[in-house]
Amino acid sequence: MRMHADQLTIATATVRALVDEQFPAWRGLPVRRLASSGTVHAIFRLGDELTARFPLRPDDPAVARRRLEDEAAAAQELAGRTRFPTPLPVAIGSPGHGYPLPWLVQTWLPGTTADDEDASTSVGFADDLAELIAGIRAIDTRGRRFAGAGRGGDLRDHDDWMRTCFARSEGLLDVPRLRRMWTVMRELPRTAPDVMTHGDLIPGNVLVSDGRLAGVLDVGGLGPADPALDVIAGWHLLADGPRRAFRDRLGCDELEWARGRAWAFVQAMGAVWYYAETNPAMARFGRRTLERILADES
């Protein structure tokens, strides 16, 4: 089922043709589509060691290529900065065979996403997440500052989006209560300078093995932002006890912790209604995060 009204269709046969034409050395590698809760790319396994990622929504090809180049640069910047593996860029493909955009080949990471292996009750997993975030924060921003329109800047910039979410969530969620919570959250002041963040630590981007963090996916959002942004991991990925351990290990003060909860709220609100019919894993993740936030308020 299509998640986006303008979503592109990418057939396995198209991927096969693009790989064979543009990267002849990989002609012998099998291609298969991977089931994924991802909302930005279609993912194809290419042999045993590679994956190919195809943007799902139309864009100007030159803009899309710059975005993939930025993603590859972010992956290189993060590589080796923590002990947790992340995918490495290998090549950027070009449009062709009816597919209108550039696409990215990167290394494959073994493991199971936290969508499929729940490690939320593991204190070891909580410690790993805190270690990951601390390692990313230690990367030099080199003078860069948050300049995007997404999560990571001023909470109040998301008022229009939240109004849309509340309107579309009638009948799905306790909207009056959630509106009241947002009225308080949006006023939380920003006092700390930008640090480097992953920006999207949701279950589908985190690999788990035996209750521990095994790897991190979708690293293209690496960049400077509100230090509270990656605190979303505590709400998206952890039950109450491990979440407290995560906070202690990360050393969050009251304001950073509250802003992290607010960023998780913004992301979760959009996931529930937008993906209610088309991506059950994403909708389920949004509901679970909101349940944790509501329970914390009680």
Image: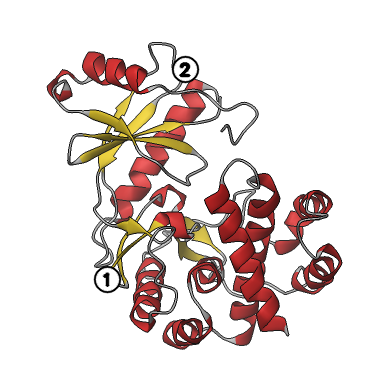
Q: Which residue sits at x=23%, y=38%?
A: 50
| Label number found at residue 123 | none
Marks counted in the figure total 2
Give the quarter of the figure containing the C terminus: bottom right
Q: Amino acid at mark 1?
A: Asp
The numbered mark, 1 or 2, whose residue comes first in the sequence reads 2
Residue at 71% x, 82% y: name it.
297
Quarter residue 188 falls in:
bottom right
Reading the image, the residue beneath label 1 is 210
Foreground residue among 258 and 14: 14
Q: Position of residue 237 (x, y in %)?
A: 48, 69
Helix, strand or loop under label 1:
loop
Q: Is residue 63 above or below residue 287?
A: above
Drawn side of residue 262 relative to residue 105, left or right: right
Give percent across and percent down for residue 21: 24, 13
Vertical arrangement, residue 46 with respect to residue 24, above or below: below
The residue that mark 2 highlights is: 100
Secondary structure under the numbered disc 2 in the rendered image: loop
Q: On the image, which quarter does residue 3 sit in?
A: top right
Callout 2 amino acid: Pro
Give the quadrant of the N terminus.
Answer: top right
